[in-house]
Image: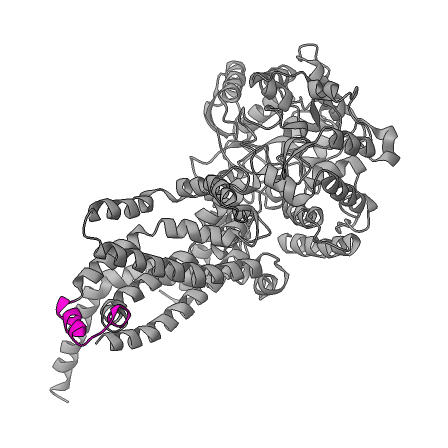
Amino acid sequence: MTGAHPLRAKRRRSALRTTAFLSPWLIGFAVFFLYPLLSTLYFSFTRYDGFRQPAFNGLDNWSYVFTDYPLFWPAMRNTLWLVLVMVTCRVAFGLGIGLLITKIKTGVGIFRTLFYLPYLAPPVAATLAFVFLLNPGTGPVNTLLDAVGLPTPGWFTDADWSKPALTALALWGVGDLMVIFMAALLDVPKEQYEAAELDGAGAWARFRHITLPNISPIIMFAVVTGVIQAMQYYAQPLVAGKVAAGVIGGSGQQFEPGYPDKSTLTLPQLVYNLGFQRFDYGTACVVALVLFALSMAFTALLMRRRGGLIGAGE
Amino acid sequence: MPRTGRLTTATAVLAAISALATACTGQGADTASDDPKADVTLNFWHGWSAPSETKAIEENIARFEKAHPNIKVKVTGNMTDDKVNQALRAGGDKAPDVVSSFTTDSVGTFCNSHAFADLNPFLAKSGVDKTKVFPKTLLEYTQFEGNQCTLPLLHDAYGLVYNKTAFAAAGITEPPKTWSQFAEVAQKLTKPQGDSYEQVGLMPTFHGYETTPMRLAAQWSPTYFTPDGKSALAADPAFAKMLTAQKDLVAKLGGYEKLERFRNTFGDEWSAEHPFHTGRVVMQIDGEWRAPMAKEAGVSFEIGTAPLPVPDEQADDYGKGYLSGTIMGIAAGSKKQNAAWELVKYMTTDTGAVVAFANAIHNIPSTFGALDSPDLQVTPEFKTFLDIARHPKSSTTPAKADGGTYQLTFTDFAYAVEKGDVGDVPAGLAKTDQQIDTDIAKAK
């Protein structure tokens, strides 16, 4: 008993010291993550418009979102489509361009600049440019397709083509991934390629057994950041939909995002629409929580996969 | 501290927080107690952005400040409803005391959430009988369930603006009055070119600028809600008739896809390159501003204006149209509501102020006094819209608790109809009714 007290005091001091060192992160976590998350959860069970006091309404908002809100499921489908297709295309295209440029012997700087520059364009400006380029009636892309006898899609005005058009826009701005992949590809030890060549490995075998395992953490990084971007996709589909629908802003007309046929509607657009245009904060919180759950699910899936990829790399 | 003491303190703190929260959200006080004669500065937010419009506002405010030397007005323009709503919720010294908005659809939300103060007590205090000052339709879209949380500040009437020169070239001597004449004239004026058009008589699709389902529906004199507040789209045949007529017109002019492709070649509605100005569209469903805008753009043809056609069976009602406009209200959280009322009263009810503003921005005056004022500048094109505004059967869309969400739901259905995606229009309207009722019940 006599020696226990000083030991306890020492442990307490140690715990306090650890907490003190951790406190900046703990405070940040509590203020910027935990509190907003818990508030969102709380408001999702209330009727709250920002003026009147929040009133508890049970599962009304939740049942409204899943059964009565006509925009939720189209937005969910579009977001999942963008996560799966757009992210895959971006990663594959970024890696492809990165590989191509690392092979080029002359004028590398020019190609790097050419592929990187579009990434610097502000999203709204880039989207406006794409709506112009892909205008089904007057755009240069369709003029070219028509000239060579190919069918001319409706792009941003056709529900079947609007998401591929957004994907094309995302590929155009793939410069960030290209730079990251280039750095990773240049880091792959040359001896491994030389040894493989001596063993008679072809280009595909070298890519499959040397390049891919070496850059797998970078691919994982590209996928994770791509998924995050796709989950937050807001400005580009909104601007493209608005411009293609001919709604630039006018005499008090309302605009429901998603033109054409809700095909460009995403979950973040719903959060804004419900929260800051309809001022139904409670329902907006439900959609925000769905988005959060979806992000967590994708993250968990990718982290499990990450273990496998790193294992392959090692 | 004894237990009872702690409880008392906790209760007091909770009460204080509640009071503070109430104050922050602008709830509680039904009457304003500020002295309108005291020196005060008001924040006034509006949505106009064109130089001529902001100049007109500044001139109006200068006249107000001259008449009320104790009140200074800080004007902020180019404000959208989103920004206004955020600022009203945030509150504080920088939040607006007085707001004007172009979106009459927001009135239901503004009134239902008590974001704006009820102006009935202010009208009563000032001895203003609103029914003698403002036309009935305008009072309809500025209040919600008896809460007159906004007042009209000029308004818009929707009619037909047409290219008289193109009409003459096609041998058409007068604007169409009935829907069947309208379809016939639109077809006659349409010149296909390959799989597109050289010119269309009318761009009928609902994405065509001001051609919204609500504006067309007004020609059928619709009733949007039953007396007990239920959506009546399926119950009133006006909606199905309008949608069918519109779908037929789209088919007659070349079909949805071909028209939408052509529409995508159009520019900004508010630019000089508007397809009506460039002669690519001969008839445009639009407000009273289009004719002066086209003239400012230097069009080479003669412009005519007319009311929108009516259904053949309602030919006697020719002259009616859809009305909406700008609204003005006082932030419920404002501490300067009596002074703010002086500004609102001046801008919305003072005949001189309303006429001067209407003349400056080519909008229709919103008071009986201003409509009859000899100072109102009336061109032949403008007179058409004044007559639409005065027509007893001109109508608007009612304010509801969900703002304009019910209109968006109806519009969404109308898109599907014109595209040919709806086989059974009445059944679709009944389903749309259900959605609207659900949304409104939720908003309440």
Colour style of the rendered protein structure: one colour
Q: Pinpoint residue A123: horizontal percent, then vertical percent.
A: 39, 44
Total number of numbered discs in the rendering: 0
Residue A271: tell me if it is visible. no
> In percent of the image, x 55 and y 60: which residue is there?
A46
Q: Is residue B154 magenta?
A: no
Given residues B65 and B403, the one toward you in this image is B403
Left or right for A10, reference B13: left
Given residues B428 and B186, the one toward you in this image is B186
Where B252 falls versus A48 (above or below)?
A: above
Q: Pinpoint residue B274: horizontal percent, then vertical percent.
A: 57, 27
Left or right for B301, reference A309: right
> In percent of the image, x 62 and y 34: which residue is there?
B150
Magenta region: A189-206
Q: Pinpoint residue B20: horizontal percent, then vertical percent.
A: 46, 48
Q: Pinpoint residue A213: horizontal percent, then vertical percent.
A: 25, 72
Residue B156: tell me if it is visible. yes
Q: Is residue A197 magenta?
A: yes
The residue most toward the top is: B374
Q: Quadrant of residue B272?
A: top right
Q: Main secondary structure of the magenta part?
A: helix
Say which quadrant the N terminus of chain B sits in.
bottom left
Where A179 falls versus B119 (above or below)?
A: below
Left or right for B289, reference B33: right
